[in-house]
Image (spheres, rainbow, N blue to C red):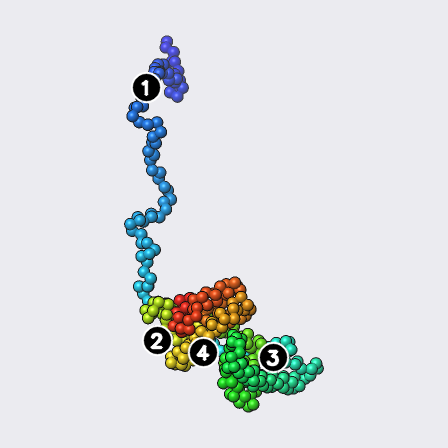
Amino acid sequence: MFHHVRRPPPSWRLVTSPPVLLHARFLSTPVPTPKTRPSNIPLNSTIPKHNKLDLRPAPIKPNKSSTVSATHIPLKATVPLPKPSPGPAPLPSLSASKKEAQRDIEDAEAHGILKPPPEGANWAQRTLHKAIQIAKFYYNGVKLIFIRRKEINLIRARIKAGGSLLTRAEYRLIRTQKSDINKVVPFLFIALLLEEIIPLIAIYAPFMLPSTCILPSQRERIETKRADKATAFSLEYRHIYNQLKQAEPPAPGLLPLEALTQPGATTAICGLLRISTVGIDALRIRRIKNHLRFIAEDDKLLIQDQLLDKLSPKDLEDALGERGIITRDLTLKAMQSRLKWWLESVGDSKSEARRLHLLVNRL
């Protein structure tokens, strides 16, 4: 009788594997023997290093052979620059001019030049009072012009008799008196007919007023506008000044009036000298010539009276402005230095061409 033996399922079988023998081998790295340094290599020799890789490289510099030296830069532009065309400064409106004239009268009243209206006066009384005060001021100014004639006659008689030399103050007084005499007749005509528009003339046409009929604030505004005009001309007409510098002079250090033939040259010089630019070239050249003659005589009297260190800041500014030298932002020492340079440069020469050369080459 046979007994049936129950075998376990396949998943219950135990799988055994024969043992595996692992063999390990110890390896040794041979150590190289140190080589001896050759005797002909110096000990302090440097070992060349490999170039580093720059992850953010800078722009490559050009070779020296490809660069252009600063001395080889052309002085003239290859493309001509457009010439500026400065126009006349815009005139203030009539309402703004009236307000400015009113401020001039109030400033004169604050300085005691005009008597202020009484307190409590109404509009009509104040207006009449101001008109009377302005009429008195103009009357006294015209009267002073005729009083100065006696003083000037005494100065001329003294010089003619062989007395003391003419001083700079006397020379400038005579020149101012001559200008006022030419203005007093049309001024009287306007004052008798249209007195109320004279404050507006100080704004729109200040050249028509005699020097004795200008209020302090009006004079300050006129001089400021002249200085600003000269500064603007020195910048806007620079191309013309550069062309005059490059003109061939008849002699070193001279620039004759005949060189002012190119368009705009006379206007550029008149604006720089703070004189009128109105008219044709012939009139402007005449003004430039007369002004340079005045400057030549003024230079001689400055040296004669030894006034270089005695002039006030205001007189220094006026003297430099008359010679076409920009005085904006200059200290007292700087203005004295520039006037000294001018007087030393002209010396005892009365040449107009010499002064015109200094005027242009100073810019």
Callout 2 amino acid: Glu
Q: Position of residue 105 (x, y in %)?
A: 60, 79
| Vertical position of residue 282 compared to residue 63: above or below | below
In the rendered structure, which disc, 3 or 1, sits on the residue that comes first in sequence?
A: 1
Q: Which residue is mark 1?
A: 33
Instruction: Say which of 163 and 100 sits in front.
Output: 163
Q: Nearer the viewer, mark 1 or mark 2?
A: 2
Report the disc number at residue 276.
4
Q: Which residue is mark 3?
A: 105
Q: CA distance from mark 4 to mark 2?
A: 20 Å
Q: CA distance from mark 3 to mark 1?
A: 110 Å
Q: CA distance from mark 1 to mark 2?
A: 97 Å
Residue 64 appearing in the image? yes
Q: Which residue is mark 2?
A: 258
Q: Position of residue 191 (x, y in %)?
A: 56, 88
Q: Nearer the viewer, mark 3 or mark 1?
A: 3
Dot 1: element:
loop
| Rendered residue at 31%/63% (across/down) | 78
